[in-house]
Image (cartoon, coloured by chain):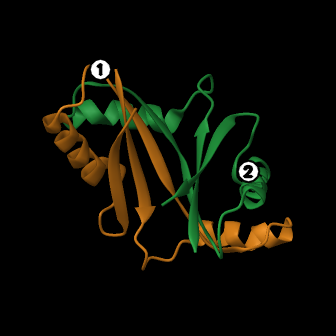
Chain colours: A green, B orange
Amino acid sequence: MARVVVDVMLKPEILDPQGKAVHGALPRLGFEGVVAVRQGKRFELELDGDVTDDRLAEIRNAAETLLSNPVIEDYTVRVEQ
Amino acid sequence: MARVVVDVMLKPEILDPQGKAVHGALPRLGFEGVVAVRQGKRFELELDGDVTDDRLAEIRNAAETLLSNPVIEDYTVRVEQ
């Protein structure tokens, strides 16, 4: 059993209203010193068996077609210990 | 300039319909061998200056009060290099 994490974030040039809302709320709640906030999605995929290069490539493919919109989002895939 | 990442995931005992939907879609798209999927949120906070223990404690406080609902969600805070 292995866990693969896919993080999906809006590309830097895309406006992120959720992150902006969090950024605006922080000082109102007394938290200072945060310059910027970006909000994205995190997917945890549990695989049966081991993580091979082939399966990682397949997950990268799924990240690109199902989990993210590659026009506006970037993704990273990593194996979590 | 430092980046702190806050990951917010539903607690394991809470049903995750988004993750379930992704899990159901994977085999239809030809991706096999994924046993479970959980979907959560990822926040990237850019701080001015260095990350001290005090500021990390403050961000943990923000994660608990603003970024997550501690009744149904768990969060992790980590400094990203």
Residue B4 in the image, given as x and y percentages of width and height? 35, 37
Residue lying at the far left of the rendered structure: B54
Question: Which of the 4 image quarters holds residue B75?
Answer: bottom left
Secondary element type, mark 2: helix
Q: Which chain letter goes with mark 1?
A: B
Point out the frontmost of discs 2 and 1. Answer: 2
Q: Which chain letter goes with mark 2?
A: A
Question: What distance separates the C-alpha of mark 2 from that of mark 1?
Answer: 33 Å
Give, as a three-letter code, the residue at label 2: Arg
Residue highlighted by disc 2: A60
Question: Which of the 4 image quarters holds residue B69?
Answer: bottom left
Residue lying at the far bottom of the rendered structure: B13
Residue A69 in the image, given as x and y percentages of width and height? 74, 43
Question: Pointer 2 and pointer 1: residues touching (CB < 8 Å)?
Answer: no
Residue highlighted by disc 1: B48
In depth, the one of B1 and B45 nearer the eye is B1
Residue A7 in the image, given as x and y percentages of width and height? 57, 47
Q: How many labels were placed on the picture?
A: 2
Residue B6 in the image, given as x and y percentages of width and height? 38, 46
Mark on residue A25?
none
Residue at the image point whose x is 19% and y is 40% from the top: B58
Of the 4 image quadrants, the one containing the N terminus of chain A is bottom right
Give, as a three-letter code, the residue at label 1: Asp
Mark 1 residue crowding within 10 angstroms, few (<14) / some (14–19) / many (20+): some
